[in-house]
Amino acid sequence: MRRTIALLTAVWICSMVGAAQETPEPSRQELNNRIEKLETEVDELKQIVNQLRAHTEGNGTATEPRAADAQTPATPAIRNAASQPQIGSQSLVSAEDRTALDFLRDTTLNLGLDTYYDYNFNAPLGRVNLLRAYDVLSNEFSLNQASMVLEHAPDVSAGRRWGARLDLQFGQATDTLQGNPANEPRPEIYRNIFQVYGTYVAPIGKGLNIDFGKWASSLGIENNYTKDQINYSRAFWFSFLPFYHMGARVSYPLNDRLTLNYWVVNGTNQVEATNGFKDELFGFTAKPRKSVSWTMNYYLGQEHPDRIVVPPTSPIPVQPGLSFQAITPAPDGRTHIFDSYATWQATPKLTLALEGDYFIQRLWRQAGPGRSSAPAHVDGGAGYIQYQLTSKVAVATRAEYMSDRGGLFSGVTQALKENTVTFDYKLADGFLMRYEWRRDFSNRPSFLSDVQGVLSKDQNTATLGLLWWWGRKEGSW
C-alpha cells in the first residue's frame, strides 16, 4: 500500500517537472491555483486509498489497486460497497443466520388485551348478564380476553406453500368459547388453544388451500377478536352458532370473485368427537363487486353423543376421561344450519352488513316407539350499520331478532330481540375506547332481576370497553 502511494506521488512529480520544462515560469496566482487543485486531488486520492485499505485488509489480503481505480474519484458505488456489512464478496451474515432472519421476517407475533366495565340496570343478583357471550358480568372491572397470535403464513410467490397459525387466549371469553364439559369429554386440555392449524397450498389451478387442525368457526358474521367487530358485545347468533371446529377444510378460488369452501370436522365445538359421525360444510364466498362480500354456508352434522364418560373401569391404564359407557340406542338425528351474511362498503365511511340464519335439529332421524322426530329450530338474523365520522371516531348500531322454537339457545321457546348502539374513540393505533348501550328484550321473562326467582322481560346495559393490541400482523386477526 505504501508503494502504491509512493508511485502515485512520483508520477505526479515527474509530470510537474516535465510541465515546468516545457512552459515558462508561472505567476504567483497560477501557482496558488495549481496548489489548491493539487490539494483537492490529493484528498480524493487519500479517500480512495483508505476505502481500498478497509476493503482489502479486512479480507486478510493486500492487493494493489488498479491504475484506473487510482485515477478515478470516489464514486457512489465504492462508497456503498464500503458501507455494506460485507467482506469481499462474502456477507457478514451467515447462511444459517440469513435463514433465521427470513423466518422471523415472514412470521408475525401479535398480542391483544380486551377489558371492560359493564353496568346492568336490572341490578341482577350475582351481577350476571344472561344470554351474553363475552360481557357476562355487571358492575365489575373485568378481563374479557388476553390473546396471542403467532402466524407463519404461506407465501407462494416466495416458493413457500406451507404455513401455520397458533392463537392462545385467556380470560372470561375463553371460558365462554372453549370447552363445555357437556359437549366434549376433556375440554380442559384444549381450553386455552383458541386456534391451531397447519396450512398447505396445493399447486392445483389457482391454488387449493388446505388447513388441518382447530379453527374458529366462520358460521355467522361475528368472530372472536373485539377490535375487528362493529360492536363490543356479541349478538345472540354469535353465542348460539358454533365457536370452533376440529378437522380439515379446503378452499379453492375459481376466479377473483368466487371461492368454494368445504369442511369435514368432528362436530360443533368439539376437539374430541362425541360420536362417530363426521360433520360437513359446503359453501362459497362471492365478491360480485370490490365493495361487496357475500358468504353462504350449509352445515350438516349429528351433534348427539353416543357415549357417556364414566369412572375408569379397565385394569389397563388409560388417560383420565377416556373411560366411556355406550348409549344404546344412541340418538342419530341430524343438525342442519343454513347461514348467510353479506357486507357492503357503501362509501369509504359507511359500512352495511346483514346476516340470516336457519338452524334445525332432530333427536332421531326416524320416528319409532319411544322416539320423537319432532324438530326444534331457531331462525332470524341481524343487521349492522357503521359510520366512520373521523379517523378516530365511529358510531355503529345493531338490530337483531331470534325465534328460539324449542329452546335450543335459551332453554325456553321465545322471541328474542336486541338493539345496540356503539361509539368508538381510537386514541392511537392499537388503543381503542368503545362505549356501548344495549337493550335485550323478549316476549317471555328471561333475564335476571334484583329479586331472587323473579325474571324480567328485558335487560339494559351500559359498557365501556378498553382494547389494546400490537404486533406486525395487519388487518383483521
Image (cartoon, grey):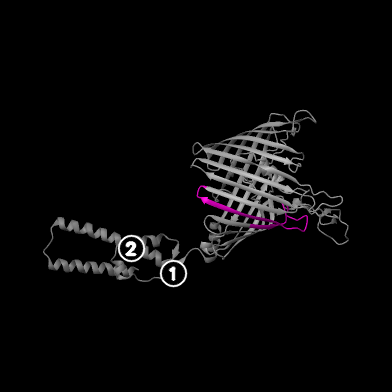
Camera-nearest residue between 187 and 16: 187
Q: If you read the primary sequence from the N terminus, does the residue marked by circle 1 or circle 2 appear first? A: 2
| Residue 124 figure quarter | top right
Say above or below: 109 vs 210.
Answer: above
Q: Which percent across, then down, holds residue 23?
A: 12, 65
- Mark 1, secondary structure of its residue: loop
* Span highlighted in magenta in the image: 262-291
Q: Is residue 473 left or right of residue 16?
A: right
Q: Nearest to the eye among marks 1 and 2: give it.
A: 2
* Amino acid at the residue labelled 2: Ile
Q: Is 273 part of what is drawn in magenta?
A: yes
Assign a secondary structure to mark 2.
helix
Q: Nearer the viewer, residue 471 or 296?
A: 296
The answer to which of 477 and 4 lies nearer the viewer is 477
Indicate whether residue 280 is drawn in magenta. Answer: yes
Pointer 1: what residue?
60
Position of residue 270 measured from the top left corner of the image (x, y, whole percent):
73, 53
User: Is the N terminus in the top left, top right, bottom left or bottom right quadrant?
Assistant: bottom left
**In the figure, residue 384 lies in which quadrant?**
top right
Q: Which numbered disc covers residue 48?
A: 2
Name the residue nearer the viewer: 144 or 29: 144
Neighbour class for label 2 at 10 Å: few (<14), some, many (≥20)? many
> Type of residue at label 1?
Gly
Q: Is residue 64 visible?
A: yes
Q: Is residue 320 above or below residue 88?
A: above
Task: Name the residue at 62% across, 39% down.
Answer: 232
Residue 164 shown left or right of residue 136 in the figure: left
Q: Who's the residue at 40% across and 67% down the image?
A: 56
Res. 171 in view = no
Quick one: which residue is furthest to the left in this view?
Answer: 24
The image quarter in which residue 313 lies: bottom right
